[in-house]
């Protein structure tokens, strides 16, 4: 192997090991009381947003989870359980892709639906007020266990300034009336 290629392989291996350690550390932070995991819904069928004329009370009119997304949601719950993370409360957007992610990941828990987690993709004028209420919801969480919030890309970006992939989550720690971002985790 040429020296440049060998150096590239060593660098890539080092980065992979560091990333894996960081992901484990982020998941470990979820074992501490009072953590919040804000999750972007699992993988959907292709598309952006929802079809014109969709209705919140009719899943047939929305963009829904793909089969891969359904498996991803189940894997999310299984991964957290295997890592010793105790999820005690699950709250979700009313959109079917979020509700299905929550129910598939945490079938043993009831899912509460919060309008503050609903997407404002089609109405950005709601972003500031909705994000303020969501920020307060996170700041008040004390546990026990982990609060899981299942929502949409636009909501997570407005709240944390981070873009997330479908099935990715941001780990938050409430602190002093606000929260800190501890990292992200993919499922």
Image (tube, rainbow, N blue to C red):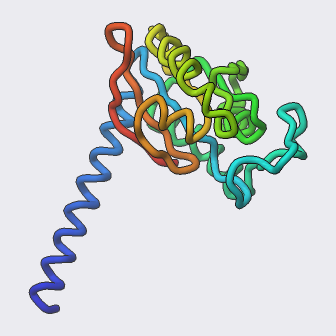
Quarter of the view holding residue 66:
bottom right
Q: Position of residue 65 (x, y in %)?
A: 74, 50
Residue sitting at x 9%, y 87% = 3
Is 151 rendered above or below residue 4? above
Q: Position of residue 181 (x, y in %)?
A: 35, 29
Is 21 rendered above or below residue 15? above
Asked whether 186 or 144 is in front, the reply is 186
Quarter of the view holding residue 125:
top right
| Most distant residue in the left direction | 3
* Left or right position of 109 against 136: right
| Most distant residue in the bottom direction | 2
Asked whether 86 or 8 is in front, the reply is 8
* Left or right position of 152 against 163: right
Residue sitting at x 49%, y 39% = 169
Residue sitting at x 17%, y 72% = 10
Q: Position of residue 149 (x, y in %)?
A: 58, 27
Residue sitting at x 65%, y 52% = 43
Asked whether 67 or 32 is in front, the reply is 67
Q: Position of residue 57 (x, y in %)?
A: 88, 31
């Amino acid at each position: 192997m040429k020296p440049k290629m060998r150096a590239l392989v060593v660098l890539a291996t080092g980065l992979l090991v560091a990333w894996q350690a960081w992901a484990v550390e982020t998941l470990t932070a979820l074992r501490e009381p009072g953590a919040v995991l804000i999750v972007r819904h699992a993988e959907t069928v292709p598309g952006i947003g929802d079809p014109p004329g969709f209705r919140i009370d009719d899943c047939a009119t929305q963009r829904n989870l793909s089969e891969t997304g359904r498996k991803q949601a189940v894997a999310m719950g299984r991964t957290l359980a295997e890592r010793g993370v105790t999820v005690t409360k699950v709250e979700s957007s009313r959109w079917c892709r979020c509700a299905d992610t929550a129910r598939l990941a945490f079938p043993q828990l009831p899912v509460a639906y919060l309008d503050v987690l609903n997407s404002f993709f089609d109405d950005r004028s709601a972003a500031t007020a909705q994000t303020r209420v969501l920020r307060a919801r996170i700041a008040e969480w004390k546990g026990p266990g982990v609060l899981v919030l299942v929502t949409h890309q636009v909501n997570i970006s407005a709240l944390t300034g981070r873009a997330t992939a479908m099935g990715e989550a941001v780990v938050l720690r409430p602190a002093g009336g606000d929260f800190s971002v501890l990292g992200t985790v993919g499922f």
